């Protein structure tokens, strides 16, 4: 069976600014807004007269616009259904992949990413399967990290301040250092063909898009991480079972909403490794950083600010997608498509800015506010011993979500009978995923309490 592949590129697929073919314009925007930008047409379309090598292909498409739009609408509907299925399937890595991860437990992966919410998402997904992440805020800082310690893999954003991902990758590959052959996977919201090719040509091994898709992220780990080289070889499946049962017995410190209009809380929480509190903290930060109002359309869409506006929209698309704030993500995708092509109209911009303002107001209203500082309740020695026992067990199993629950309990009470410096260091070690020195401090506390 013959097939034709049509790729919708960011330059507008050959459309000029004055194109008046509504059906084709709708189809073009539909392609750009759907999850995939490449669609394979069946033999039925070829029989309709389309020839990809024909210089008058656009004219043929216009003549058969009604037929093509019907096919496109059906394909987009299928793509959306497929995308929904992926969303449902990305709450956790597949069982067979979890089994594979036990040979990577304790691996060190460097994340080069400048946005703190995207940093958090990537780190949580790695930590969920027992991989220890470090975070650099730009390419230059990433190279400094590589000079100090060994990593097994890098996830590299492309658009970063000071030094972008491509420049950093070129330096890593060409510097003759021991880490020059480390696997590097691009992690960016730009999924156009030429952007992916740019990443590969500068020395990266592969590419994953944003919002971060668990089903593409985890296979990259399995493909590029060296196997059987780590001291920790815990059964991840058993760890997750123990962690899940233990966490269910620990009360949440803060009550969060179960439903927020336009936001997929389950998907967002899954991207944070199931850590509900961390997800909502990032969601609150996202709401706080959204502007109360935006600049005028004329300023935003001006030639002088085009690059700056594109960078901001690209960042907002990635962050809102990772947090599953779909009511901002969807309209931002549409706006970015038109902005890049310099076809942005005022009506689209106004609708987008109003949507952002509405989401900000809604999140401020439904999310718990910042708690007023007040003296912490005094904790007892018995409470402290119980927390230490559970925390020590969680640290030994690298049960990260469970560790977070126990540290929340430590933070919400005052234990005046222990060293404040040691307690602070314990919390810092756990936040940095340094579980071995954290466990040593727990054992020190337990010895002092006579718990061993």
Image: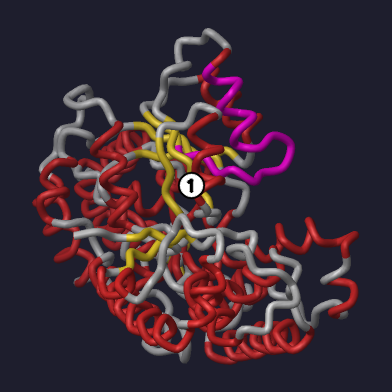
Q: Is residue 88 left or right of residue 415?
A: left
- Nearest to the observer: residue 416 or residue 63: 63
Q: Quadrant of residue 441?
A: top left
Question: How many C-alpha atoms fall within 10 Å of the one at disc 1: few (<14), some, or many (≥20)?
Answer: many
Residue at the farthest top position = 176
- Nearest to the observer: residue 431 or residue 422: 431
Rendered-image quadrant of the N terminus = bottom left
Q: Quadrant of residue 316?
A: bottom right
- Nearest to the observer: residue 220 or residue 319: 220
Query: Which x, y percent locates residue 128?
Result: 29, 52
Query: Which x, y percent locates residue 62?
Result: 54, 79
Is 161 rendered above or below residue 68? above
Q: Which residue is mark 1?
A: 187
Judge whether residue 164 is colored magenta. Answer: yes
Q: Is residue 251 visible?
A: no
Is 94 rendered above or below residue 297? above
User: Quick one: SS at disc 1?
Assistant: strand
Rendered-image quadrant of the C terminus = top left
Q: Quadrant of residue 139?
A: top right
Query: Which x, y percent locates residue 22?
Result: 60, 87
The magenta stretch spans which residues? 155-173
Query: Which x, y percent locates residue 76?
Result: 38, 78
Name the residue at 54% across, 86% down.
23
Judge whether residue 419 is colored magenta. Answer: no
């Amino acid at each position: 069976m013959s097939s034709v592949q049509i790729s919708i590129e960011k330059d507008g697929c050959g459309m000029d600014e004055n194109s008046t073919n509504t059906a084709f314009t709708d189809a073009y925007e539909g392609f750009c807004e759907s999850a995939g930008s490449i669609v394979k047409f069946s033999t039925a379309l070829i029989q309709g007269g389309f020839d990809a090598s024909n210089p008058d292909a656009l004219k043929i498409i216009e003549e058969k616009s009604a037929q093509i739009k019907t096919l496109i609408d059906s394909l987009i509907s299928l793509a959306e259904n497929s995308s929904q299925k992926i969303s449902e399937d990305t709450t956790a890595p597949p069982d067979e992949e979890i089994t594979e991860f036990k040979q990577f437990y304790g691996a060190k992966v460097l994340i080069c990413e400048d946005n703190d919410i995207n940093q958090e998402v990537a780190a949580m997904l790695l930590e969920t399967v027992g991989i220890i992440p470090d975070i650099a805020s730009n390419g230059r800082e990433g190279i400094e990290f590589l000079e100090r310690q060994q990593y097994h893999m890098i996830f590299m954003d492309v658009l970063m301040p000071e030094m972008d991902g491509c420049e950093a990758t070129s330096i890593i590959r060409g510097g003759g250092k021991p880490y020059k052959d480390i696997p590097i996977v691009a992690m960016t919201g730009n999924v156009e063909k030429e952007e992916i090719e740019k990443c590969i040509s500068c020395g990266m091994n592969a590419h994953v898009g944003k919002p971060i898709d668990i089903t593409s992220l985890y296979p990259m780990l399995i493909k590029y991480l060296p196997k059987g080289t780590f001291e920790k070889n815990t059964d991840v499946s058993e760890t997750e079972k123990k962690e899940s049962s233990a966490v269910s017995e620990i009360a949440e410190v803060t009550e969060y909403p179960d439903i927020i209009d336009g936001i997929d809380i389950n998907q967002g929480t899954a991207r944070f490794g199931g850590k509900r509190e961390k997800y909502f903290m990032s969601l609150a930060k996202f709401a706080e950083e959204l502007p109360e109002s935006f600049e005028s359309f004329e300023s935003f869409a001006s030639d002088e600010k085009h690059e700056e506006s594109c960078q901001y929209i690209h960042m907002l698309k990635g962050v809102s997608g990772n947090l599953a704030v779909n009511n901002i993500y969807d309209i931002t995708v549409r706006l970015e498509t038109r902005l890049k092509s310099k076809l942005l109209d005022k009506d689209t911009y106004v609708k987008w800015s109003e949507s952002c303002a509405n989401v900000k107001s809604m999140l401020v209203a439904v999310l718990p506010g910042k708690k007023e500082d007040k003296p912490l309740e005094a904790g007892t020695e018995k409470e402290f011993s119980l927390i230490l026992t559970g925390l020590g067990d969680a640290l030994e199993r690298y049960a990260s979500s469970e560790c977070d629950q126990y540290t929340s309990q430590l933070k919400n009470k005052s234990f005046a009978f222990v060293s404040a410096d040691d307690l602070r260091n314990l919390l810092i070690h756990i936040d940095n995923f340094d579980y071995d020195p954290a466990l040593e401090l727990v054992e020190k506390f337990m010895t002092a309490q006579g718990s061993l």
